[in-house]
Amino acid sequence: MKYYNNWRDLRKELLKDPEVKAEYDRLEPEYRLIRQVIANRLKKGYSQAQLAAKIKTKQSAISRLESGGYNPSLNFLNKVSVALGCKLNISLT
């Protein structure tokens, strides 16, 4: 078994497989959004619980959003973006 020093090296190796690459590309928009939510939450200095309180939901809902275990509505994403002082942009290209 080969060991990798970091996630980037492992990802590079995994993406050589066309099936893995196709699935990675399919999921990229979702994970990009998750990274943006987490980055903006941390930039504001909010815990998951604090963000949840601002949008009147439970911390577990924020946790599920950030882990990718939740398919949020546009309304929910808009509430999160407002609480984080961000603008929600959605586009089809």
Image (cartoon, rainbow, N blue to C red):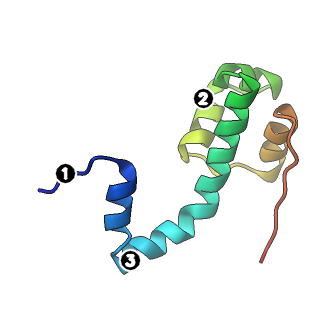
Disc assigned to residue 3: 1
Mark 2 or 3 closer to N-term?
A: 3
Q: Position of residue 67 (x, y in %)?
A: 53, 42
Tell me the amino acid under the disc marked 2: Ser
Front residue (pair 11, 74): 11
Around disc 2, counting alpha carbons within 10 Å, would you say few (fewer than 14), some (14 to 19), or many (20 or more)? few
Depicted 26 relative to depicted 41: above or below: below
Tell me the amino acid under the disc marked 3: Glu
Tell me the amino acid under the disc marked 1: Tyr
Quadrant assignment for the C terminus: bottom right
Depicted 5 relative to depicted 43: above or below: below
Q: Residue at x 55, y 47 (%)?
A: 68
Q: Residue at x 58, y 54 (%)?
A: 31
Disc assigned to residue 60: 2
Q: Is residue 15 left or right of residue 78?
A: left
Q: Secondary structure at mark 3?
A: helix
Q: Position of residue 11 (x, y in %)?
A: 38, 60
Depicted 45 relative to depicted 15: above or below: above
Look at the numbered discs 1 and 2 and tell me whether their residues touch, using CB distance below 8 Å. no
Q: Nearer the viewer, mark 1 or mark 2?
A: 1
Distance from label 1 to label 2 (Cα)? 34 Å
Q: Secondary structure at mark 1?
A: loop
Give the residue pinned by disc 3: 19
